[in-house]
Each structure stands twice: as C-alpha cells, then as structure tokens.
Image (cartoon, grey):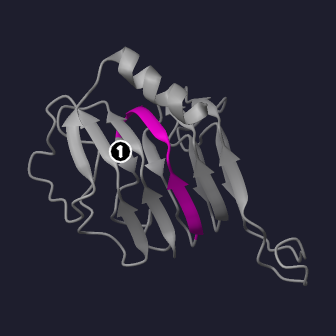
C-alpha cells in the first residue's frame, strides 16, 4: 500500500458499492459476478497496512489462494456487508491476526466467508488467532496452522480441532512455506 495517510488499506483494496449487470457468471444477465481469483502473489504490506487484501463495503466473490502475504495486520477481512470471500492455502507471515477480529463489523456482516488451510505466522508471543468458537455461523474457519513464539494462544479456546497452534518456525522455514504456495 502506498497510502501513508491511513493504515486502513492494503496492497489490494476493493469496494463493491455499485452492482453491475453482467452475464459472465452464468451467461444470463445478473448482478452476481463471476468469482474473482487472486492467486500466486507475493504481497508485502508496508506503511502499516491493515490487510494484504482489504475487502471493503460489500466486496464479494473473491477467492484468494496460494499467496504469500507479508507484514499485514490481519488476514481475512470482510465488512460492511461484504460476503462470499474465501481465503485458503495462503501463508500470512508476521501478522497480528490471522483473520480479522470477530467482534464489531469485521466479520459479522458477511455471509459464506471462508478462512481455511492457511499458515499464519503471528508476530506475537501467544496471539494471532481469535477463537473459532465465537464467530458468525456463516463463517468457516478450519484447517489453519497458527505459529507464534509460545506455541499457544494463552487461553483462547479453539473449537475446531483442525485449527492448530505451533511454535514459530525459523525465517528460512517461513520463506520455504511461502515459496511452496507460490510454486
């Protein structure tokens, strides 16, 4: 992100405030677009980016996969009626939260959002992952590996046994994880 006035941006920022009629998805006119794919990218967030992919204001129908994201504050974000955003098979390196905070507007307004099968290296001792027990029923959070300096979440409860926490790997191992998803 080159926006230095605010941290509320990322290298990729979208807004879907106005629907367009298209026939790309089904061949028939509809305001429902085809899926937008964001894949095989190295995105390095600078200037305190809020997310590597910042989906704002109704952003929808995004599939972000096989990406290597470095230095953003959060992973998945979908707010202000954003929906149908899927983040899977990504590496989030040196982030504060793997997926946006579960309270407030961040994920509560979206439908059919997915955060699965990601590697998330947190830049904290025992954080990086909100409880997967306290989330909207329409949000899927599963199969993720979270790494932090303690290898624990210090009391944050995980309800999905496929979400696991491990000790942070070496920098070389983080780079290897990122290179593997980009290959």
According to the picture, the residue beneath numbered tag 1 turns out to be 97
Q: Residue 148 falls in which quadrant of the image?
A: top left
Give the secondary structure at mark 1: strand
Residue 6 as seen in the image, left or right of residue 20: left
Q: Residue furthest left?
A: 155
**Can residue 48 be seen by looking at this rendering?**
no
Q: How many marks?
A: 1
Quadrant housing residue 175 = top left
For image coordinates 37% across by 62% down, the residue present is 141
The foreground one among 137 and 107 is 137
Question: What residue is drawn where x is 60% and y is 40%?
Answer: 10
Quadrant for the N terminus, please.
top right
Looking at the image, residue 7 lies above or below residue 60: above
Relative height, residue 99 to residue 108 (above, below): above
Residue 52 or residue 6, whichever sits in front: 52
Residue 42 in percent (x, y) is at 61, 30
The picture places residue 35, in percent across and down from the top left corner, at 72, 64
Q: Is residue 64 above or below residue 27?
A: above
Residue 21 location, x and y as percent? Answer: 89, 77
Q: Magenta segment range?
A: 82-96
* Magenta run includes residue 165: no
- Is 170 located above or below residue 4 in the figure? above
Most common SS among magenta residues? strand
Q: Nearer the viewer, residue 182 or 71?
A: 182
Badge 1: residue crowd in 10 Å (few <14, some 14–19, many ≥20): many
Instruction: Determine if the magenta segment contains residue 88.
Output: yes
Name the spot of residue 6 as percent of width and height, x first: 56, 38
Tell whether 124 sits left or right of 39.
left
């Amino acid at each position: 992100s080159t926006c230095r006035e605010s941290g509320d941006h990322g290298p990729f920022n979208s807004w879907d405030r106005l629907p367009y009629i298209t026939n790309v998805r089904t061949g028939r006119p509809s305001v429902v677009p085809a899926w937008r794919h964001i894949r095989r990218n190295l995105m390095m967030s600078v200037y305190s980016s809020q997310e590597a992919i910042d989906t704002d204001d109704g952003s929808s129908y995004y599939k972000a996969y096989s990406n290597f994201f470095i230095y953003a504050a959060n992973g998945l974000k979908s707010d202000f009626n954003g929906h149908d955003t899927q983040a899977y098979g990504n590496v989030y390196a040196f982030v504060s939260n793997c997926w946006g905070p579960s309270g407030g507007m961040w994920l509560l307004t979206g439908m059919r959002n997915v955060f699965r099968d990601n590697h998330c290296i947190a830049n904290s001792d025992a954080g990086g992952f909100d409880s997967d027990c306290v989330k909207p029923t329409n949000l899927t959070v599963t199969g993720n590996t979270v790494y932090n300096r303690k290898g624990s979440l210090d009391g944050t409860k995980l309800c999905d046994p496929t979400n696991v926490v491990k000790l942070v790997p070496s920098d070389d191992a983080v780079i290897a994880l990122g290179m593997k998803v980009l290959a």
